Image (cartoon, helix red, strand yellow):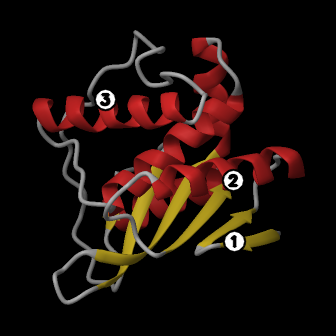
């Protein structure tokens, strides 16, 4: 397991990705976080495999199987804004989607990590309008980073049907 830290973003890699990819993701995510007015001051991003993501998905959301990204609120300020959070990204899911949509794995991983940051920054995707707003914000930030629109590149992507996970009493709260 490799860890790198810079300006409040810690990246933990337990899945198979190369060091250049992990470092590039960390640097791009740092730049993205700087573009958000209310991003958490401390972020931990874990790149994991299907088995680990499936376990977390079941434990915190009550849903079997892997998902693309989960985010966990760890600490809040007096106004209730998230000051510390963890994002878990499933590398094999990103690899499958990137291959299916014909774009680089790095773009898909960055999309997932940014999606988690946006959840921790107060965005949600529970309604159609919130879903569109969140994904427009992702594409805007990724374009500013020079990556381009990643979410809307995948024209086959659709808003998933609402699903209810089991409730967990835990310091962290999972968000899909």
Q: Residues within 10 Å of mark 2 (few under 14, many from 20)?
A: few
Q: Which residue is mark 3?
A: 136
Labels 3 and 2: the sequence-earlier one? 2
- Secondary structure under the numbered disc 3 in the rendered image: helix
- Secondary structure under the numbered disc 1 in the rendered image: strand
153 vs 69, nearest the viewer: 153
In which quadrant of the rendered view does residue 165 lie? bottom left
Q: Is residue 156 left or right of residue 134?
A: right
Q: Which residue is mark 2?
A: 27
How far across and how far down the image is residue 29, in percent? 58, 52
Check the image and report above or below for 93 versus 51. Answer: above
Q: CA distance from mark 2 to mark 1?
A: 9 Å
Residue 66, visible in the rendered structure: no
How far across and how far down the image is residue 112, in percent? 51, 43
**Badge number at residue 18:** none
Residue 144, visible in the rendered structure: yes
């Amino acid at each position: 397991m490799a860890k790198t830290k810079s300006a409040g973003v810690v990246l933990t890699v337990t899945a198979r990705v190369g060091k250049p990819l992990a470092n590039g993701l960390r640097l791009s995510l740092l730049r993205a976080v700087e573009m958000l007015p209310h991003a958490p001051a401390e972020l931990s991003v874990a790149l994991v495999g299907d088995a680990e993501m499936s376990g977390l998905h079941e434990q915190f959301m009550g849903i079997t199987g892997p998902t693309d990204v989960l985010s966990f609120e760890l600490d809040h300020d007096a106004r209730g804004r998230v000051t510390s959070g963890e994002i878990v990204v499933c590398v094999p899911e990103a690899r499958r989607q990137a291959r299916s949509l014909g774009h680089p794995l790095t773009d898909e991983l960055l999309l997932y990590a940014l999606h988690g940051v946006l959840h921790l920054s107060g965005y949600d995707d529970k309604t159609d309008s919130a879903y569109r707003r969140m994904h427009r914000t992702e594409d805007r930030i990724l374009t500013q980073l020079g990556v381009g629109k990643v979410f809307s590149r995948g024209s086959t992507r659709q808003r998933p049907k609402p699903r209810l996970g089991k409730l967990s009493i835990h310091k962290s709260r999972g968000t899909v």
